[in-house]
């Protein structure tokens, strides 16, 4: 029961290549998700800062009208 060393090595390389391809797809998927999260956080921070600025302006206007 001797196996051809070249066949065994070829099988191992095939498995490694398959794992590498799967990991690459996972990495691309994660980068896409992180990009979406980054965009969401950017808009969320804009909304929060905008609300704070409007609150300050509203407070200044309401105190000047009294």
Image (cartoon, rainbow, N blue to C red):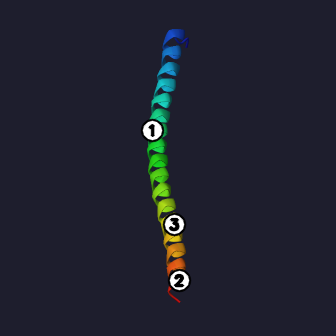
Q: Is residue 63 above or below residue 29?
A: below
Q: Which mark is residue 48?
A: 3
Between marks 3 and 2, how big is the CA–CA gap? 24 Å
Q: Which residue appears at 52% of the width and 75% of the height?
A: 55
Q: Which residue appears at 50% of the width and 80% of the height?
A: 61
Residue that carries the numbered disc 2 in the rendered image: 64
Mark closer to the observer (3, 1): 3
Q: Is residue 54 above or below residue 14?
A: below
User: Mark 2: which secondary structure?
Assistant: helix
User: Mark 3: which secondary structure?
Assistant: helix
Q: Is residue 45 above or below residue 53?
A: above
Please name whichever residue, 32 or 27, is drawn nearer the observer in this view of the structure: 32
Q: Which residue appears at 53% of the width and 70% of the height?
A: 52
Residue that carries the numbered disc 1 in the rendered image: 28
Mark closer to the observer (1, 2): 2
Please name whichever residue, 51 or 26, is drawn nearer the observer in this view of the structure: 51
User: Mark 1: which secondary structure?
Assistant: helix
Q: Which residue appears at 49% of the width and 29% of the height?
A: 20
> Mark 3–mark 2 contact, CB under 8 Å?
no
Please name whichever residue, 59 or 51, is drawn nearer the observer in this view of the structure: 59
Q: Which mark is residue 5?
A: none
């Amino acid at each position: 029961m001797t196996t051809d060393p070249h066949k065994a090595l070829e099988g191992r390389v095939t498995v490694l290549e398959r794992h590498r391809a799967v990991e690459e797809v996972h990495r691309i998927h994660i980068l896409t998700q992180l990009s979406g999260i980054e965009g969401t956080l950017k808009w969320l921070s804009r909304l929060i800062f905008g609300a704070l600025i409007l609150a300050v302006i509203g407070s200044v206007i309401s105190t000047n009208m009294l």
